[in-house]
Amino acid sequence: MTFVPLNEVGKGSRAASPGGERQRLPPWFKVRLSQGPDYREIRQTMDRLGLHTICEEARCPNVWECWNNRTATFLILGDICTRRCHYCAVTTGRPLELDREEPLRVAEAVQALGLRHAVITSVNRDELPDGGAAIFAETIRHIRRLIPTCAVEVLIPDFEGNEAALAAVVAERPDILNHNIETVARLFPSIRPQGKYARSIELLDWAKKLGARTKSGLIVGMGETAEEIRSVMQDLRAVHCDILTIGQYLQPSKEHLPVARFYHPDEFVAFKTEGLALGFSHIESGPLVRSSYHAEQQVPS
């Protein structure tokens, strides 16, 4: 078991400078590389059942820590996204036909791994009338049937503002409903060109009014200001969002948006302090924090 700077871990591990050269990450970006028995079991289970994880598709820096703690985030609706966000490593293209057996296989994986908290996310499937909401709902039902004691968190797309699609997911009463805002309003059109800032805020508002415990995530370092970060937190609290994650953007490849700024760990502590003062019940804030980081700690007892 060793601690290795992310610069040395592999593809996408460095940020690009404005001139195109690869710049090294600050010294606090270190991860512990360890493929213990829990890590290997998750890998073998995913391979055996033909499932995807966002941990791998999005090149999450926490994969070693989380998998060794028997936590992983399932990626449903395939692994090809209909949208091209300029910070995201997930493959963009024309998705394959829906795998109708996928929800059951996800539940079987949760059961085989003995998970107490399962996180389910997806690619965007804008070609589907409901954006894949029915597959989310079916996945929750299968997990609840096979492992009734397991908490279920869903990280959903915006369903293009389809309220009926959102209602179908909320009707299955996930323990946490997450929809990531990702960036500030000013940068949204250039970074998430197929999304809309107001639509994402409205979705979280609808979910709360339907009775969901809501969560969102923000990536910093893409060109926003500290005041804009505060504005996002205020907008999320205005719709009574409960939980927030804040993490540093890391450029997945040279084709993606360059990192504009690396925030110091102390600044992430300050964001957390400000957010808690606004009324969030739980905040995960740090350079390596991602949407599902410590997710099992965010469900009320």
Image: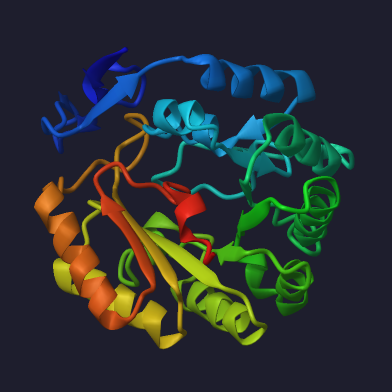
**In this orientation, does residue 97 appear?**
no
Quadrant, the N terminus: top left
Residue 28 pos. (x, y %)? 14, 34
Please tell me whether residue 149 is drawn above or below residue 18 in the rendered image: below
What residue lies at 17% left-to-right and 74% top-to-bottom? Answer: 227
Give the residue at x 47% y 15%: 36
x%, y% of residue 106? 76, 39
Q: Is residue 161 left or right of residue 260?
A: right
State how the image is colored. Answer: rainbow
- The location of residue 244, given as percent across then percent down, is 39, 65
Write the residue at 33% across / 47% down. Answer: 289
Whether residue 89 can be seen here: yes
| Horizontal arrangement in the rendering, residue 169 relative to residue 69 (left or right) | right
Pick the front one: 58 or 154? 154
- The quarter of the picture where residue 251 lies is top left
Q: Give the quadrant of the C terminus.
A: bottom right
Q: Between 27 and 258, which is closer to the camera in this rendering?
A: 27
Q: Is residue 237 left or right of residue 107?
A: left
Residue 230: image x %, image y %?
A: 23, 74
Residue at 62 percent across and 57 percent down: it is: 154
In the depicted structure, whether residue 3 falls above or below residue 222: above
- Residue pushed farthest front? 301
State left or right for residue 150 relative to residue 87: right
